[in-house]
Amino acid sequence: MSGAGQIVVAGLGPGDEAMLTPEVRAALDTATDLIGYIPYVRRVPPRPGLRLHASDNRVELDRARHALALAAAGARVVIVSSGDPGVFAMASALFEALEAAPEHQGLDIRVLPGITAMLAAAARAGAPLGHDFCAINLSDNLKPWSLIETRLRAAVAGDFAMAFYNPRSASRPEGFGRVLDLLRTLCEPTRLLVFARAVSTPDEHLQVLTLAEARPEMADMRTVVLVGNAATRRVGRWVYTPRSA
Amino acid sequence: MSGAGQIVVAGLGPGDEAMLTPEVRAALDTATDLIGYIPYVRRVPPRPGLRLHASDNRVELDRARHALALAAAGARVVIVSSGDPGVFAMASALFEALEAAPEHQGLDIRVLPGITAMLAAAARAGAPLGHDFCAINLSDNLKPWSLIETRLRAAVAGDFAMAFYNPRSASRPEGFGRVLDLLRTLCEPTRLLVFARAVSTPDEHLQVLTLAEARPEMADMRTVVLVGNAATRRVGRWVYTPRSA
């Protein structure tokens, strides 16, 4: 390989190709190397001239370093994330790797946004994030649990609607139950929640229910959970948060 | 008009057609009626058979009622928003209008997400929203100023990164100065901010600076302002928030 390498960090959106932006499509079409978590790399159709580098979960920094090395050698690398790369995904990991590798800071790097899970889920449910809201990653793989609790309390104190990413996984089965328990001490039992699983894929499943009805096992790795603010309400089969509250 | 009417609430993204999703493109291509704020309707190329209903700012509810009436009469209506329709845009207004019009609750309604301004801006800057963050509408047209202050204080207490929509307009020249003054009492002067104006349009302009350097007149109606959390930092020309903080 030779010539000017580059890195594009691209968001594939939630699943359906109809939500993939043309600029991400164009980047995928001209890449020499594709890097990402196995199920995301699998979403890109293989073609001659495109090398695939799929890796397992929790190796984000290794993946970012690999991208830098390939681009430095002249490759046109696309790092794929599901949803938006800047929301609990690969963009932050890439800049963390870049911070530790000053020799690569002259590389051509671009971040291309995508439709993030909470906004795809909100669209399916109506407008539950229709006013001020927070996005919180419930995984404590990289941060202490106390910080998650601090942020939940602050979000409720500010009466923000909320979107929870990574609510529950096989390796973290307990945390989401603690989150629901904490919310039950802070919010009224009629608070509305949306459990949105695998939006825009054949496995899509949407549940709208109250905090009193919510159970930890309703969420898994592919679920984003939306929590309304105190004014969020139902209109027919829809859920929305008024613009004034 | 006759037949089954429908309403699609569609996000046009921040400006560049390369960020418009194929599903929104398809909805625009088959619409009979296009409704929205003047500059957003102007972004859709006119064609025979597409009636344009462009209206001024601050008439969101009238616009939503108009859409319901047209769809009830059999039209295929697309309501366009800039960015994502569920983020400080027309989706919430539509469900508010629907709440007051039970006779229309059987209509075929879909919300199609788009690339919202904060994520387009974040992608240009690096990954400033790379960990937990809040989105706050700084307009007090529909809510009391005290609620904006409560949410700012809560967001800082939770050490969230923040995205401010509608920071400043000709009719609200004062509020954003008050926001910066409040932040200066709560955050360190080196806190990083991104002023991102008209991202992905020919007028795009990005400024990265500290809270000490920020001035109210750096923002206008077309600006989204991102505020890092306490750990947000620069790497070369980029800004990112670590995944662990």
Image (cartoon, coloured by chain):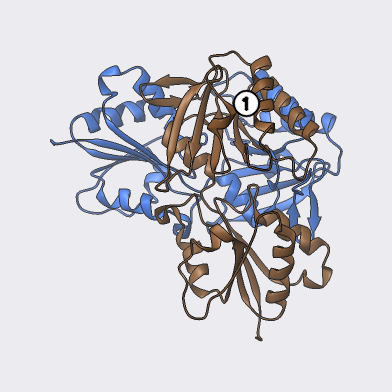
Chain colours: A brown, B blue
- The answer to whether B235 is drawn above or below residue B147 in the figure is below
Would residue B30 be found to the left or right of residue B18 on screen?
A: left
Residue at image position (18%, 31%) is B73
Q: Position of residue B229 (x, y in %)?
A: 77, 40
Q: Position of residue A181 (x, y in %)?
A: 67, 21
Would residue B26 be found to the left or right of residue A1 on screen?
A: left
Residue at image position (39%, 54%) is A18
Q: Position of residue B165 (x, y in %)?
A: 60, 37
- The answer to whether B152 is drawn above or below residue B85 in the figure is above
Assign the N terminus of chain A to one quadrant of the image: bottom right
Q: In the rendered image, which quarter is residue A238 located in? A: top left
Q: Which sits in the foreground, A214 or B235?
A: A214
Assign the C terminus of chain A to one quadrant of the image: top right
Q: Label 1: how many residues lie within 10 Å, few (<14), some (14-19) or many (20+)?
A: many
Q: Secondary structure at mark 1?
A: loop
What's the amino acid at mark 1?
Answer: Phe
Q: Which sits in the foreground, A10 or B136?
A: A10
**Can you see residue A243?**
yes
Q: In the rendered image, which quarter is residue A60 located in? A: bottom right
Q: Label 1, on which residue?
A: A160
Residue at image position (38%, 49%) is B42
Q: Which sits in the foreground, B57 or A195?
A: A195
Q: Which sits in the foreground, B127 or A173?
A: A173
